[in-house]
Image: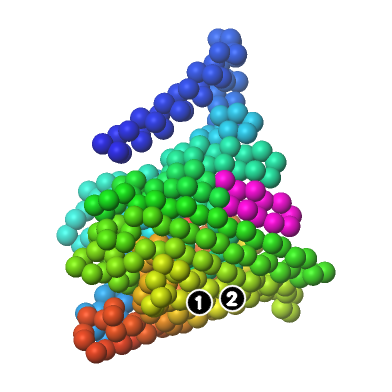
Amino acid sequence: MKRSLAAMAAMAATASLALASSETKTPSQTPGLVETLLEKVHLKSDLRLRYESIERDDKKNVYRNRYRFRIGAKVDMSKHLRFDVGMRSGFANPTSGNQTFLDDKPLQDYFFQSLRFYILGLTYQSDHNTLKIGREPYMMYRPVKSQLVWDNDVSLNGVNYRYKDETRTVVLGANRPSWEEKAVSEEEVDLFLAQYVQKISLQENALSVGAGIYWYEGLKGNTPLFGKSKGNTLVDGRYAYDYHLVEGFVEWRGTLFGRPLKTAAGFVWNTATSKNNFGYDLALQVGKAKKVGDWQVKYSYTDLQEDAAFGAYTDSDNFGGGTAARGHAVRAKYKMGKKLYLAGNFFFDKLYESKSKVDGMEPDYRRVQLDVIVKF
């Protein structure tokens, strides 16, 4: 039902744009109408092919081939108003569009079936202000793309505002995570957020200092939002605590031997409980895969206690997703062609005993991802 309504909304918005444009055209200007309409629609898509291995001491190893497909459009409704729509594979996974190739099923039988809307909303943009309404990617700043609190692929459902200029960024939002397609919690869950980032120029370098508050309501005593705890503490199958998160970070940007260099340190603290409530992330990145032949390498060390963050939205690759682990991550990317990238991610982690499948064990967790990415 949600998919049908979303599809109808997308078609209605596109049709209204076409009708609005046609009111100012005469029949003899039809070719111009088509060209004008196409100028208002901005398409974007990408395909990622991935080989992945997961080896951990407490359960069977996994070796698999996967893909992620995304397609989206931005439709200019007016000078400042835009309609956004996007679909990705993964059967509505909130933090991943990855889909495993199935040996016992032809590709055509499930490729399009796995596509779901992860973007469906309106964006109003004017000068330094951006307002997003609907299901849209989050706008919070992440130092060196940290996934300590937010996985790369999370979308928010609600109303979110950002002010951004050369020196500062302010983000405010009110959202309902339980509106996501795959949400299965018994009760509704709300998320209120605020973030402030100050940028300080230091001649050829730059320093950013930021803080955020992410206040979830409706989690304590509720069943898991997406069916799994993802490292968070459960009692009788329900969240033991609320998640009222405070985030802080500092990021420095400069150069090293002529290449871009970024370093960052950040923490998250759950004020709603006094136990297992702290996590931190240290990161360094050299290079940037922007032009053909460019490369980048990022190293990070992360330690995230069980209830330091809301596990359903943290990095879905490191630790196997969620919280309750610590370890190293190396991520590399090389731009091989104008639209072609090669990438690799390597994780070397130690899972907390609370996340282990074997009592009394802190298992090693090793994950390798080798990617080919094509952008269209």
Is 369 situated above or below 341?
below
Q: Could you tell me residue 120's position as x and y percent?
A: 43, 40
Q: Could you tell me residue 103's position as x and y percent?
A: 20, 62
349 with respect to 81 (left or right): left
Residue 298 visible in the shown view: no
> Which circle's residue, 1 or 2, is located before the other in the chain?
2
Q: Could you tell me residue 313's position as x and y percent?
A: 40, 62
Determine the residue positioned at 68% across, 66% down: 208
Task: Report which quarter residue 270 is drawn in.
Answer: bottom left
Tally the marks: 2
Determine the residue positioned at 56% across, 73% down: 266
Q: Could you tell me residue 201's position as x and y percent?
A: 78, 66
Q: Residues within 10 Å of mark 1 (few under 14, many from 20)?
A: many
Q: Are marks 1 and 2 in contact (CB under 8 Å)?
A: yes
Considering the whole magenta stretch, tell me its main secondary structure: strand
Residue range corresponding to the magenta coloring: 161-171
Determine the residue positioned at 50% across, 18% down: 19
The residue where tag 2 is placed is 265
Q: Residue furthest right?
A: 203
Q: Residue furthest bottom?
A: 360
Residue type marked 1 = Tyr
Q: Residues within 10 Å of mark 2 (few under 14, many from 20)?
A: some
The residue where tag 1 is placed is 280
Residue 290, magenta (yes or no): no
Task: Report which quarter residue 196 is drawn in.
Answer: bottom right
Residue type marked 2 = Ala
Q: Residue furthest top?
A: 27
Under circle 1, the secondary element is strand
Under circle 2, the secondary element is strand
